[in-house]
Amino acid sequence: MKEETFFKNIDVLSELKLRFGYGETGQQDGIGNYTYLPVYNVANSQAQYQFGTTFYDLYRPDGYNPNLKWEQTATTNLGLDFGFFNGRITGAVDVYLKKTTDLLSVVDQPAGTNFSNKILANIGNMENRGIEITLNTQPVKNNDLVWDFGINATFNKNEITKLTFTNDPTFPGNLIGGIAGGVGSTIQIHSVGYPKSSFYVYKQVYDAAGKPIENLFEDLNRDGLINVNDLYRYKAPDPDVFLGASSSVSWKNWSAGFLLRANLGNYMYNNRFSNTGVMRNIIDPLGFLANGSRNLLETNFTGNGDKYLLSDYYVENASFMRMDNINVGYNAGSIISKNTNLRIGFNVQNVFTITKYKGLDPEVSGGIDNNFYPRPRNFVLNLNLDF
Amino acid sequence: MKKNILITNCVLAVLFLVIAQSCSKKLDLTPTNDVTSEIVYSTPAGYKQVLGKVYGSFALTGNQGPAGNGDVQGIDEGFSDFYRLFWKAQELSTDEAVISWGDVGIQDFHNMNWTSNNSFLTGLYYRSLYQITLCNDFIRESADDKLAARGISGADADNIRQYAREARFLRAFQYWVLMDLYGNPPFATEATIIGGAPPPRATRIEIFNYIETELKDIEANMPAARSNEYGRADKGAVWALLARLYLNAQVYTQDPVTHVLGAPRFTDAITYSKKVIDAGYTLVNNYTWLMRADNHLNTSEFIFTINYDGLHTQGYGGTTFLTHACVGGSMPASAFGVGGGWSGTRTTKNLPLLFPDLTGTADKRSQFYTSGQNIEIANVTSFVDGLAVTKFNNVKRDGSNGQSQDFSDVDMPLFRLAEMYLIYAEAVLRGGTGGDATTALGYINKLRGRAYANDPNSTTGNINSGTLTLDFILEERARELYWEGFRRTDLVRYNKFTEGTYLWPWKGGVSSGTGVSAFRKIFPIPSRDINSNLNLIQNPGY
């Protein structure tokens, strides 16, 4: 576009390109072999059954889904690439729409319709809409000093547009996201009109001091009962905004850089707090002590009943800003002999994280924080000698 | 250099060849290692192995004993065992049992405040419907056209048709469980397609009628009572389930809106309990032999059993749960045939106080461990509060231990003769015809004679006709059948389950006991299935 007559005379503009793309991709993550037809498995010799005096090896049918197919995503995007001042400032703006059909998810099967009560199925359609902005600049460039600085931002909105299970408007959605604690409990839901994996929780009632009152929830449908009809959709684990910034500077033989990243609007179910931060977990009725979460000191929950696990109190804002990497390097040059070269570098990974999230790490994929293995902070000193 | 290109080309050619060969011409592939239904059902022996799973689903939690490849997903495998869950729902909710553990939702049974999220109620529901799904599949695969297509005929085909009738019995039994506990479950039959539309909901009355019709339909062609292989159902089992169904018929066919009881069927209860009694069953002489490691010898009394085995049928449910969870405190585990107790289950004082003494001196059914145990329960979660029950032991009649210290050999009778005697007597007292009070008294005194003198024909411990009242029957059922999964059903039939007129320690979560809302006479449909099957309607109150 830069060559077009109306842009040709604008000198500061060094590059301008308009892009339009359309593509379809398929994915089959999680689809095992032969899950579309009935397969039988033989039980092991500790799982036999006795008729008369004989123990029989058993054949068990596996659950299967005769209608299983790939998940498909059609992506449409419109992009504009630009450059100013001879490429000192370059960037791109992309608007995209991703339509996913036959979304794959492991969901409950109606009891009595399969040999497994949870099956991977194509549950519906989903849309992702968003804008991606990238900007790379080189504010300084001369013989001694070069500074590159770039930022990027993505605004994404995710929404389930259709569930194939039923068109019934009263259908709340497919429950997913198993949690530790209540055996078999789920904390998330795929619902039409909401982001995927939205948290599906009870609305916690707090006392005057702001402390959650155990097993007291708002009766959202005002029918005098607290039951599953009072669950509501509260936030989702996927961020609304991704931000990133990177910088690198080199001055003579020195170089330095960092990588900064932030996610905004992502929420997390703190399963560590809900599962271990109750009295019942710490003083086990069998008479031994177990490690518990310090969250107990805030809630004083006894852990009786099975509803407190589904409280929105445990869904926390997990927005964060993280310094992924920071590094400094020095090229000492040929210090031993003519053909050698020594480079010294120091870099730190996972430098710091700023977040309001109270758990161990605000970045756990899936949005359920349970026994997350802590990310290490690495300090690396490099000495490279070329000869 | 030229040589190198040649080598490269050769390698590429070989690679291409390998890739080309690994593709199959067919688009629809079938497994090479796993077994498809066509292979499984190609021989009569294969049918029997599937039948093994249809039955084995009672005793096992998965395909890998004791655990590791569960049948039911989304639930801890140990929590997905049929009898363990059935027992908790039927016993922990009553005066007969408390448990010290803290698993989420387990105390809700005794506190009587369970919800539709309860893990144990969810597990039992999925387990029962899982077994029904297996039965449905087996019945489908045993249809005449399928047998003909597979070239199975003659005696082999007759055997398989018999297996299918047994699958219909097991299905009827599980529908009885669902009807008794959950009221109005989904209704899946062999016509329900795997992976297809959700099954419709059936009301309690519809399920009642279905069970009755199914059992009467298979009755004539089932093997004679006491003639089938040990562990498989026969006419005796069919009659026994009908007798139990009819005894509770008024509750099961109660009007869901007005709560007016349904039509009494006590005459039918007498008819079918009498059929069992007259089929030649006799009581085992020693009551304490009933729930022992070699209780497969009790075939004269046991009508239908779930078979467990310490070496071949391992799991963390069933009698392994019953024999381990009851051991704790100062109880020497080895004396009870287990490697270590799980310090869980005890009883409230209501049960032991029904006996003349706590040591089994007079009534030998009184099997309690008292040393270091308090009869009063200050704290439900403390094992030493409440007497321990020693009815279930992984020890043989001769005192030697079962095969394994970790997994029980004790088989669990789902039906035994004593229950039939009690049904007969209660049905006579409740006005059923076709039986008489003298016979009823005679049956009860057989239980008493065995209890007091290890001899059903002894007159020791016998009662007279004046003592034989409905209230006495309920107490006698507790003395004879405690911890065998009857109590909740019995208390509901006697209007003592939720009512404030009969209390036990910590009933409704209060130390002295309190009544709870009547809607708790049935459990809620688990919310997970309400969410997956829009045909279902939650039971009132939940």
Image: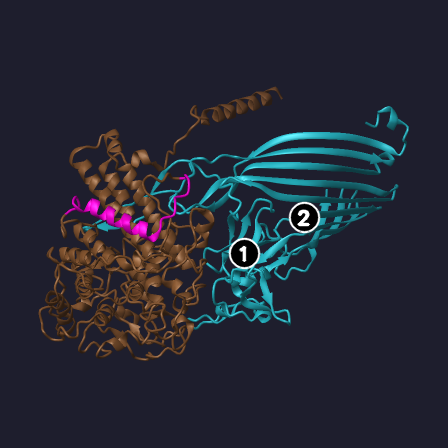
Q: Which chain is cyan?
A: A
Q: Which chain is brown?
A: B
Front residue (pair B310, B124): B124
**Secondary structure state at the residue bearing disc 2:** loop
Quarter of the picture holding the N terminus of chain A: top right
**Secondary structure state at the residue bearing disc 1:** loop
Q: Residue B424 bears which disc, if any?
A: none
Q: Residue A240 bears which disc, if any?
A: 2
Answer with the quarter of the image where residue B507 lies.
bottom left
Amino acid type, mark 2:
Asp
Mark 2 vs 1, N-terminal side: 1
List the residue tagged with mark 1.
A231
Residue B467 drawn at (x, y percent) = 17, 75
Position of residue B43 relative to residue B535, above or below, is: above
Q: What stretch is highlighted in magenta?
A: B195-223
- Is residue A46 visible in the rendered image? The answer is no
Q: How crowded is mark 2: few (under 14 residues within 10 Å), some or many (20 or more)?
A: some
Quarter of the picture holding the C terminus of chain A: top right
Query: Does B222 appear in magenta?
Result: yes
**Residue at figure coordinates x 22%, y 44% from the top left:** B165
**Mark 2–mark 1 distance (CA, rounded to whole Å):** 23 Å
